Image: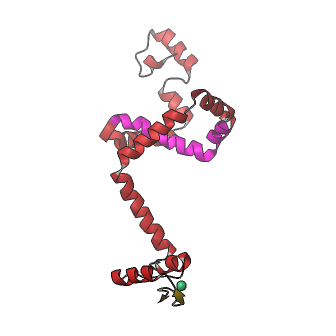
Amino acid sequence: MKYRCAHCGKANNGWAGHVNRARARGLKLYCDRKCSGLGRRLGKTKTQLKEEKRLYDIAYRAKNLEAIKAKKRAHFQKTYDRKAAAQYRKQRMHLHVEYCRRPEYKAWKREYDRRYRASEFGEFAEAYMLTLDLNREIKGRKTNAEIKYENGCTNKSQRREREARQGPSRNRHSTANG
Ligand SMILES: [Zn+2]
């Protein structure tokens, strides 16, 4: 029995039963699988399809999170080899060491550690970090000589001589005398 492909329009010959069944149900008939596939396309662009899949995946993950996690846990328990993993880590340790020596990593780690240490102050973490910065700034503006003078680390022999003459001094540096 004759019918026309719903995609390319070519005339075909098919089993009467198949054609009648399709017509009775208002279904489309195609030449072959290729025409069927092309005929069912919705004309979406690749970006559109990717975006839809991305959103679908997010929804799927949110909905089935427990099941996904259980599955992953089971696979891990089944396949994890503690000894092999340790061996593997050991083999690659020199690479890890090199990785940690990179200046970008050091900068990142410095910032990470700073935040980590500040996190123990909870909601005051920001204030703590600002205080540290301020302290560093103040220290940066003073010279070493100034700091040493304030801490009583300068002119020691002079001071000792003076103290020997006058008895124990009560000046402001007396506690820091080394
Ligand atoms: Zn066709």
Q: Residue 78 in the image: x percent, y percent?
A: 51, 34
Is residue 14 shown above or below 149?
below
Dominant SS type (magenta): helix
Q: Is residue 167 above or below residue 111?
A: above
Q: Residue 59 at what x, y percent from top left?
A: 36, 58
Front one among 120 and 21: 21
- The residue that appears at 35% across and 42% down in the rendered structure is 127
Residue 114 visible here: no
Find the magenta span and give its range: 95-121
User: Residue 109: percent from the left, percent from the top?
Assistant: 53, 41
Residue at (52%, 18%) from the top-left corner?
A: 159
x and y percent of residue 17 in the render?
42, 80
Front position in the image: 8 or 117: 8
Query: Which residue is the extreme one toward the left?
Result: 123
Q: Quadrant of residue 93?
A: top right
Seen at 51% across and 31% down, the residue is 147
Q: Is residue 115 magenta?
A: yes
Task: Please tell me whether residue 48 is drawn above or below residue 171 in the rendered image.
Answer: below
Asked whether the viewer can see residue 52, the reply is: yes
**Where is 156 relative to 84, above or below?**
above
**Residue 116 lies within the magenta run:** yes
Looking at the rendered structure, the number of numbered marks drawn on it comes to 0
Ligand 1 - quadrant of the structure image: bottom right
Q: Residue at x 69, y 33 (%)?
A: 91
In this picture, residue 25 sits left or right of residue 81 = left
Identify the image's colour scheme: rainbow, by chain, secondary structure or one colour: secondary structure
